[in-house]
Image (cartoon, helix red, strand yellow):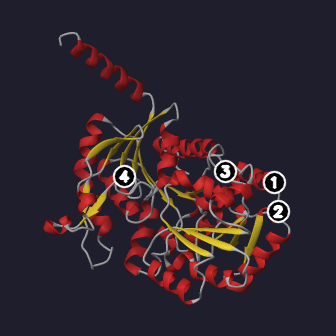
Amino acid sequence: MHDVTPQLAVEKRSQAWEESRMLRVLTLASLFPSAVRPVFGVFVERQTLGLAAHRDVALRVVNPIGLPPGPLKRHVHYRAQAALPARETWKGLEVHRPAFPVIPRMGERFAARLMARALLPVLQTIRKEFPFDVIDAEFFWPDGPAAVRLGRALGVPVSIKARGSDIHQRMHQPAMRSAIVAAARAADGLLAVSGALKADMVAIGMPAEKIRVHYTGVDMDRFRPATDRAAAKAALGVQGPLLLSVGALIALKGHDLVLDAIRELPEATLMIAGEGPHRPALEARIAAEGLGERVRLLGAQPHEAMPALIAAADMMVLASAAEGLANAWVESLASGTPIVIPDVGGAREVVDRPEIGRLVAREPAAIARGIRELLAAPPLQDVVRASAERFTWAANSAALYEHLAGLAAGRGA
């Protein structure tokens, strides 16, 4: 015992000295995986793992968990979330999961304020052992306004990243829109997942000079073309063209439009990977229109299952009404699978050549036409894959480090 304790003390002092030479980042992410929701915010997790691996970065994650007050937190909807550990190691990351109060059926307008109030003592405690240089908020609502409040209280610069839905879905709610724009103006730096999203942010009053475009990355080793696509489809019980749609079963994702398009393509099978409140309506439509043999609702899929599924598909077909720059688009291209998507968000920044996909109007006939064109002249898998080489996690991590280090040094955007 007498030998172990001094050794641990030396190791702690050595670790503290090493961290004092590094950029110390506090990542604030309400979207982050847990044992309860292992694929929730997996794109934030992957970005965070990349940044944490940077040789000049020390990092902690704070993943706030919204829970109702009192006995309501024991409701089946919240019980598993409430049981998560307050602090744990997740894939090598130190993750804190403090609770903050949410008020059911009263909307989200108070979420940022309540989150900041609950998190301040937590961050003050963390800062005693880990004096972080910058707060990196990974979603605009409610993380962004909460981060600004926390940054002011602690005297730490703040970056907020916009991903698409956090901007587009809140703009019709005046109280949230006002809070989001105010947070953007108060933040030290901002990130947008595409140039198109940056333009949308500027249009609602956010300062252009603070916004840096920060593209997503893709794991080119995990997402790669199938050696034999026909065999991969056969393993899924599919003959003929296989179309894949990925995303939550909500109106924004437009799965109903893809269903309308599939009716015009009797030779094709459609698989939809995702879960959400529109599932009963989609199931009813599939049954009523006799599409049960050709349309499969796969439910939420583990991220580990997606590479093989995407590589087996002849194309990915998404019909979102709005996106920043969808990770699924880039993962599909890395898999050698072309995409058919509406001209929304950063779509033109991804589908910048006809050899890799089609940009179509967001209506069934146009979607069906884009599918037919690609089926008639299938793009070469290697050509499609090469277009994804612009999006690497190494580039993502390097850009994020440069951005956050600049804020910590007081250089801003």
Query: Residue reaching furthest left?
Result: 71
Query: Residue reaching furthest bottom?
Result: 288
Sequence-wise first label, 1 or 4:
4
Sequence-wise first label, 4 or 3:
4
Instruction: Look at the numbered disc 2 and give the secondary structure of its residue.
Output: helix
Q: Is residue 17 left or right of residue 284?
A: left
The amino acid type of the residue labelled 1 equals Val
Kindly identify the residue that appears in the image at 65 percent across and 43 percent down. 221
Sequence-wise first label, 2 or 4:
4
Foreground residue among 300 and 329:
300
- Tell me, for residue 383, which label it has, or none: 1
Q: Are marks 2 and 1 in contact (CB under 8 Å)?
A: yes
Kindly identify the residue that appears in the image at 47 percent across and 49 percent down. 45
Instruction: Look at the numbered disc 3 and give the secondary structure of its residue.
Output: loop
Mark 4 neighbour class, 10 Å CA radius: few under 14, some 14 to 19, many 20 or more: some
Quadrant where the N terminus is found in the figure: top left
- Tell me, for residue 3, which label it has, or none: none
Which residue is disc 4 drawn over? 34
Q: CA distance from mark 4 to mark 3?
A: 26 Å
The amino acid type of the residue labelled 3 equals Phe
Mark 1 neighbour class, 10 Å CA radius: few under 14, some 14 to 19, many 20 or more: some
Q: CA distance from mark 3 to mark 2?
A: 17 Å
Q: Is residue 214 visible?
A: no
The amino acid type of the residue labelled 2 equals Glu
Q: Are marks 3 and 1 in contact (CB under 8 Å)?
A: no
Which residue is disc 2 drawn over? 355
Q: Position of residue 174 (x, y in %)?
A: 41, 81
Q: CA distance from mark 3 to mark 1?
A: 15 Å
Which residue is disc 3 drawn over? 391
Sequence-wise first label, 3 or 1:
1
